[in-house]
Image (cartoon, grey):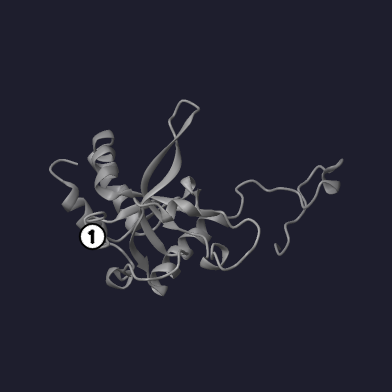
Amino acid sequence: MGDFGVLEANRYVLDRLDVEVGRFFYPAGAMALGVGQIYGGIRFAVDTGDGHYRTVRGLVYVLTHECDVDPNNERSFNTHVLICPVIRFEEWYQEFSQENTSDYVRSFLALLAARKVSRVMYLPFLGTEQLPYGGLLYLNTITNSLVEAFLHSDARRLGTATSYGIWSIDQVLQRHLFREKAERVPLDQERMGGSEHTPEQPGRR
């Protein structure tokens, strides 16, 4: 994008965001592991691109509710935490800007700020050296890690989203995960037999 460096690109996004950046996060406190927190040093699996996986330590946004991983709640299926890896903005931008034209980069940054790319969301900076320019949540990479990973000596809670921040992220998650299918599907298998048309969807007129 010419001489449009990381700092200028980040400012380009921040100037077009429709959220109040200052209300998004607050410093990490003594809270139980749960939704809305950003951690560093968490181990999770990543695709190597050749059909194999390896584990890495990185930044993650926690999606699992705290009640589901509370050690005081004895219940089944409470050993894993749902997470979304956080991509540092500067790392993403350096590669992205080299692989695309200036016009495309500028257009994508504008769409990212306006939250018109459903599969990815920009997170404002945390005010820490871990995320000086903020980060990206690539929602199609949502995965999991063990609860024990958050107790490891390398794990660091960097910050927690406010109620406003969690609400803003939840809006993007809902829009992405609950979009209506592009192709119409039948109501059930019985109605598929011998039918030459797609049954009417519930609530559609």
Q: Residue 158, position in %: x, y? A: 31, 61
Quadrant of the snapshot with the C terminus: bottom right
Q: Is residue 111 visible?
A: no
Q: Quadrant of residue 21?
A: bottom left
Residue 114: quarter of image? bottom left
Image position of 58 (left or right of 83): left
The picture quadrant where one finds residue 177 is: bottom right
Q: Residue at x 70, y 62 (%)?
A: 204
Q: Residue at the left extreme?
A: 3
Foreground pick, 204 / 47: 47
* Res 10 seen here: yes
Q: Secondary structure at mark 1?
A: loop
Q: Which residue is mark 1?
A: 128
Question: Which residue is situated farthest in the top direction here?
Answer: 50
Which kind of residue does numbered mark 1 sit on? Thr
Mark 1 closeness class: few <14, some 14–19, many ≥20 residues within 10 Å: few
Which residue is rendered at x = 26% and y = 54% of the image? 130
* Residue 118 spot, x, y in % from top left: 45, 53
